[in-house]
Image: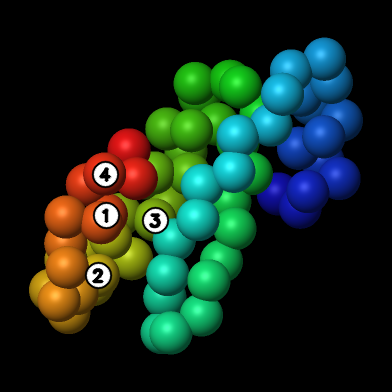
Amino acid sequence: MNHDDALRKGSGSAPLFVEIMMAGRWMQLMVVGKEELLVQAMQSSSNLFHIMDQSSSSPAQLNSAF
């Protein structure tokens, strides 16, 4: 899903931006106030979070993000 699709589906709701770091780069996931979309984003990023948990020197930052 690109940002335009998310904006169309989430019209009238304030977007929530969740930033996650992968391979030294910041990627931005836009969640438009619908819990299903947040769950989908979390599921699709599960292996990413696993990688971060293994390699991060400060996993507390990841926990505090949610």
**Residues at marks 4 and 1 touching, judged by CB atoms closer than 8 Å:** yes
Marks 2 and 4, the one that precedes in the sequence? 2
Percent x, y of residue 2: 76, 52
Instruction: Kindly identify the amino acid type of the residue bearing the numbered disc 3.
Output: Ser
Residue 52: mark: 2
- SS assignment at label 1: helix
Left/right of residue 15 with respect to residue 19 in the rendered view: right
Marks 4 and 3, the one that precedes in the sequence? 3
The Cα atoms of the two marked residues, 2 and 4, are separated by 14 Å
The Cα atoms of the two marked residues, 3 and 2, are separated by 11 Å
Marks 2 and 1, the one that precedes in the sequence? 2
Determine the residue located farthest toward the top in the rendered image: 12
The Cα atoms of the two marked residues, 3 and 1, are separated by 13 Å
Residue 31: mark: none
> Quick one: label 4, few (<14), some, or many (20+) residues within 10 Å?
few
The residue identified by callout 4 is: 64
The residue identified by callout 3 is: 45
Scheme of image coloration: rainbow
- SS assignment at label 4: helix
